[in-house]
Image (cartoon, grey):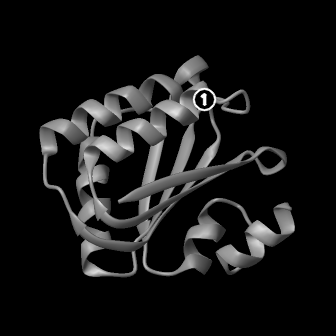
């Protein structure tokens, strides 16, 4: 699986794209790269695009470890982080639900699952209704 991200600094937003078989190892690598990126900031809203996920590695303990690592960045300095999981398919919803469960009891992270790009973007305060338009507008 490929996991990539793009930081839209001027919008305070991160676009994360998952494609293929969702493996935890790939998620750990991508998040580590994001956390070390010079444009990474606490409170950046996250659009997690799971539309390309075809299957999911089911490792709840590993997901908890990944989310703990994310919490160090997401809830730093007492800021709130909105996370929109765009999950239009069954494998995507499975992965999103696994991630959402792992945030239970964590303050500062507000995760939601959406079946449409428009709803996910609206939750994150964006005016675009499609990701392609968001990315084009961001340059």
- Report the label total: 1
Decide if residue 54 is on the left or right side of residue 32: left
Q: Is residue 103 visible?
A: no
Q: Is residue 105 visible?
A: yes
Q: Residue furthest front?
A: 1
The structure residue drawn at horizontal position 14% and vertical position 44%, both measured from the top left corner, is: 60
The structure residue drawn at horizontal position 85% and vertical position 68%, both measured from the top left corner, is: 137
Decide if residue 107 is on the left or right side of residue 104: right
The quarter of the displayed image where residue 16 is located: bottom right
Could you tell me which quadrant the N terminus lies in? bottom left
As displayed, is residue 38 above or below residue 89?
above
Nearest the viewer among 53 and 107 is 53
Residue 26, image x and y in percent?
A: 35, 46
Q: Residues within 10 Å of mark 1 (few under 14, many from 20)?
A: some
Decide if residue 110 is on the left or right side of residue 91: right
Residue 27, image x and y in percent?
A: 37, 45
Residue 123, image x and y in percent?
A: 60, 64
Nearest the viewer among 121 and 4 is 4
User: Helix, strand or loop at disc 1?
Assistant: loop
Residue 35, image x and y in percent?
A: 55, 29
The quarter of the displayed image where residue 79 is located: top right
Task: Kindly identify which residue carries mark 1.
Answer: 79
The structure residue drawn at horizontal position 74% and vertical position 45%, both measured from the top left corner, is: 12
Decide if residue 27 is on the left or right side of residue 83: left
Could you tell me which quadrant the C terminus lies in? bottom right
Q: Residue furthest top?
A: 77
């Amino acid at each position: 699986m490929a996991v990539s991200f793009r930081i839209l600094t001027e919008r305070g937003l991160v676009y994360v794209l998952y494609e293929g078989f969702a493996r935890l190892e790939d998620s750990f690598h991508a998040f580590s790269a994001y956390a070390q990126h010079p444009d990474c900031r606490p409170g950046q809203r996250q659009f997690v695009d799971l539309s390309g996920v075809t299957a999911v590695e089911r490792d709840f303990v590993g997901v908890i470890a990944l989310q703990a690592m994310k919490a160090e960045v997401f809830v730093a300095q007492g800021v709130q982080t909105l996370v929109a999981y765009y999950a239009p398919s069954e494998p995507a919803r499975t992965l999103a639900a696994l991630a959402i469960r792992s945030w239970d009891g964590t303050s500062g992270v507000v995760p939601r699952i959406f079946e449409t790009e428009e709803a996910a973007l609206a939750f994150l305060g964006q005016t675009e209704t499609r990701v392609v338009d968001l990315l084009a507008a961001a340059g």
